[in-house]
Amino acid sequence: MTYRLFDHTADFGMEIFGKDLKDLFCNAQYALFDQITELASIKNENKKEIKVIGADLPDLMINWLRELLYLWNGKELLVNKTEVIYIKDNEMLAVVYYVSYDPDQHLIKKEIKAVTYHQIEVLKISSGYRARVIFDL
């Protein structure tokens, strides 16, 4: 299981899992865009490098998800895949694969406005890492 949803008043939350930090951040991208659209409808046509910095791991996760949401909300790009190049000292470099939104090809399942700091967690667990994130709808 890469992620699961949980209820939160007027919003929704996700618990995201990964065997290591790279896997966790890749799964966070997958979980976010799996809620936005049908990922099977997205072909990996284009790629882009994204560098993100945070004060700590929870802040890095928030900034990562904000950057991904900006690609969707600001540029109408749908991201299907992520390759994390590195995560070191609360800095991350990744390559995302995306397509431009086409209403004839892509069904939008959920509009997500923002990721919040409310109850954010990124924890080391016995099976790897777990992040808990709440989104505004």
Image (tube, rainbow, N blue to C red):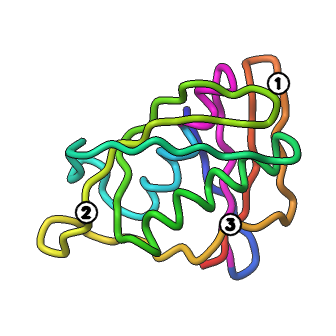
Place of residue 90 in the rendered image (x, y in percent of width and height, measured from the top left) = 80, 36
Q: Residues within 10 Å of mark 1 (few under 14, many from 20)?
A: few
Does the stretch in magenta take in 17? yes
Q: Residue at x 52, y 36 (%)?
A: 94
- Where does the image place residue 99, in percent across and percent down from the top left? 25, 55
Answer with mark 3 or mark 2, whichever residue precedes in sequence: 2
Residue 56 percent coordinates (x, y): 87, 42
Image quadrant of residue 17?
Answer: top right
- CA gap between label 3 and label 2 equals 22 Å
Q: Is residue 119 magenta?
A: no
Residue at which label 2 appears: 100
For label 2, the crowd category at 10 Å Cα-Cα, with few meaning under 14, some 14 to 19 and many 20 or more, is some
The answer to the question of whether label 1 and label 2 lie on touching residues, with beta carbons closer than 8 A, is: no
Query: Which of the pair 49/97 is nearer the observer?
Result: 49
Front disc: 1 or 2? 2
Distance between the alpha carbons at the discs numbered 1 and 3: 23 Å
Residue drawn at x 84%, y 26% is 124
Residue that label 1 marks: 125
For disc 3, the marked residue is 115
Where disc 3 sits, the SS reads strand
Q: Which residue: 63% across, 50% down?
A: 64
Q: Tell me the amino acid under the disc marked 1.
A: Ile
